[in-house]
Image (cartoon, rainbow, N blue to C red):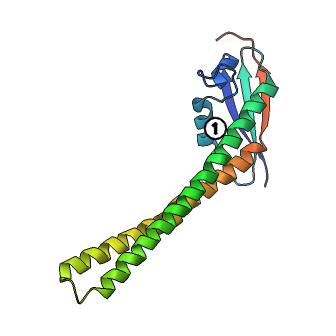
Amino acid sequence: MTGTFKIKLRIHSEDELYNPFDEDNKTLSSDVTDYLYERYKEKGLKDKLEIHITSDENIDIEKLRSAFLGYCDSQRIQLLKEKKRNMIKQLWMFGIGVLFIAFGLYASDKLPELTGEIISTIGAFSMWEAASIWIVENPENRIKQRWIKLITQTEIACENNTSVD
């Protein structure tokens, strides 16, 4: 069953949505993005995502959407870079592992037993590191890619609440 998962934000001023170091207010605050990501983890698989912001003052919704889409784009680019780095690390560690294991097997009768075991252990460790990236890091990145794809389609609604706390 498809529903809507609402993430509610309560702010006093529009400036709370943006990074305080960005004088143009084009970058979302890390507090906002962290909160959205943590709440996202609670939603159902097929739920649509909606962000509902209640503020004491009016919010420029187009400026907010632009900053939000800018955040999505920067995250997408960061994940693509991470994917490339992971691929290079995997190939590098796998190559080192193969070289060390092959050398260990080749030189096993020519080297002291302890030295051969150390070389084989280094090779196995390198291959394990490559497998760890493949088993652990790459799936985490795929989850983040799905999150970015979903949040790009997020509806953003704002409500002006003039009541005083």
Query: Which sits in the foreground, 122 or 154?
Result: 122
From this view, report whether residue 111 is shown above or below residue 38: below
Q: Is residue 99 left or right of residue 59?
A: left
From this view, report whether residue 143 is shown above or below residue 161: below
Can you name the residue that lies furthest to the top here? 164
> Label 1's element?
helix
- Across and down, in percent, residue 125 comes to 36, 69
Query: Which sits in the foreground, 107 or 97?
Result: 107
Residue positioned 59% across, 21% down in the render: 20
Query: Which sits in the foreground, 154 or 160?
Result: 154
Q: State the residue position of label 1.
A: 36
Q: Is residue 77 left or right of residue 162?
A: left
Quadrant hosting residue 152: top right
- Across and down, in percent, residue 140 comes to 57, 56
Q: Quadrant of the N terminus?
A: bottom right
Can you name the residue that lies furthest to the bottom here? 109
Disc 1 marks a residue whose amino acid type is: Leu
Can you name the residue that lies furthest to the right here? 62
Q: Is residue 24 left or right of residue 111?
A: right
- Across and down, in percent, residue 137 comes to 52, 58
Q: Quadrant of the C terminus?
A: top right
- Residue 108 visible, this angle: yes
- Residue 42 visible, this angle: no
Residue positioned 68% across, 9% down in the render: 164
Residue positioned 72% across, 31% down in the render: 67
From this view, report whether residue 109 is shown above or below residue 34: below
Quadrant hosting residue 141: bottom right
Residue positioned 64% across, 37% down in the render: 36
- Pointer 1: residues within 10 angstroms few (<14), some, or many (20+)? some
